[in-house]
Image (cartoon, helix red, strand yellow):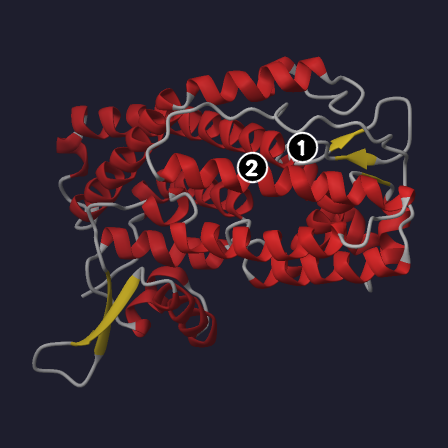
Amino acid sequence: MILPYHEDLQAKYQRIKEFIRELAILNGRKEKLMEIYFWLNTYPYLSQAEVQVLTGYSLGTISESLKSLMEVSVVNLRPRDNSSVSEYYLRDTKTSLDYTLLSRGKSLVFRVLVFMEKLLKRMKNPDPEKQDLLMLENLQDFYQYFLWVKRRQAGDKSPFDPDSLEKVEERPLNPVFSPQFERLEQEFIDFFVDQQIFEEMTEKNSQVQGLFITRGNLTISELSKLLPFSIGTVSTSVHYLETLLLVHKNEGKYGYCMYSYGVAWLNYRKYYYQRMRIWQKEFSQMKLDLDENLNGYHFIPQIGPFLVFLTRLLTALKRSQKFYSENAPLWKIAYDFSMAHPPYYPSIPKNKI
């Protein structure tokens, strides 16, 4: 029988829910989906009704979340032995948090490069107008980053070089482009959203980020004119991207900017893994306290599954720290580039890079 955690474990589980909430924000995923995923790490096989007991969510929310997890091949479904009930389980319980920590696959990188090669070719023929050169340069920067990712996936150890594409165009606030380039820009944003290039970021956040990639330097007011959203919705999206260090507020000016997509992405990933390190330290102490006082919890039937859950969580967090250490040279490249371009990264505190 599946039971929710005993009240003596609820305080500890609430801290884990805080972690789930932050992880959902950092990954652009729904918090409820993330919690259901974590319960599947605790109990190997669960029916929808059992997930409802554990979470208190409606069956509609649970069904939608499990469907999303199945669509990305994280969860499987099977009939329960000697029962008409179906149960859900993780495809690979050994990888735990890998669902949230995986980098983008080779197939996505291939699709991005094919699309960008065709788009850039159209932008260059005929010769673009002077006002359009900025968008061309920004999208070439985006393309160069994924070209480096492709080489990296093939085993090339060459470091990422954000200066490989010399940026020569002025970067005015709220740039204006020709009608032809605005149409090409919309094609790029539609592709960016459709391919979910930034994990599972919401469609609105992806559209806002897409405009920062193409235009570089924008005010919230200008974004609200370019998008069919209210200024409040746009403001929320911009501040979300700012939280992830993907865009940065201009000091002493209006507006926000993204100078290099690759650098912004690496800054975000470093911040992400730094946050994982902080949570790893807290959960390690939590497990140590439980192990040292296990006799005091022997009467709680859920202590076993909770410890399994905690152990798997710590295993995944340790793996993420290995990734963080292995990519230390990349974080330094992004940091050095950001410090060398203060007009475009004016407000990145050193303790966040």
Residue, far left: 82
In the displayed structure, does residue 158 sit left or right of residue 314?
right
Q: Amino acid at mark 1?
A: Ser
In the displayed structure, does residue 314 sit left or right of residue 29?
left
Mark 2 → mark 1, Cα distance in angstroms: 9 Å
Instruction: Decide which of 305, 212 is in the foreground and name it.
Output: 212
Residue, far bottom: 84
Residue bearing the label numbered 1: 260
What residue appears at the point 43 percent right and 18 percent down from the top-left corner? 328
Q: Secondary structure at mark 1?
A: loop
Residue 280 visible to an observer of this rendering:
yes
Q: Secondary structure at mark 2?
A: helix
How many marks the image carries: the answer is 2
In the displayed structure, does residue 6 sit left or right of residue 25?
left
Please identify the quadrant where the N terminus is shown. bottom left
Please identify the quadrant where the C terminus is shown. top right
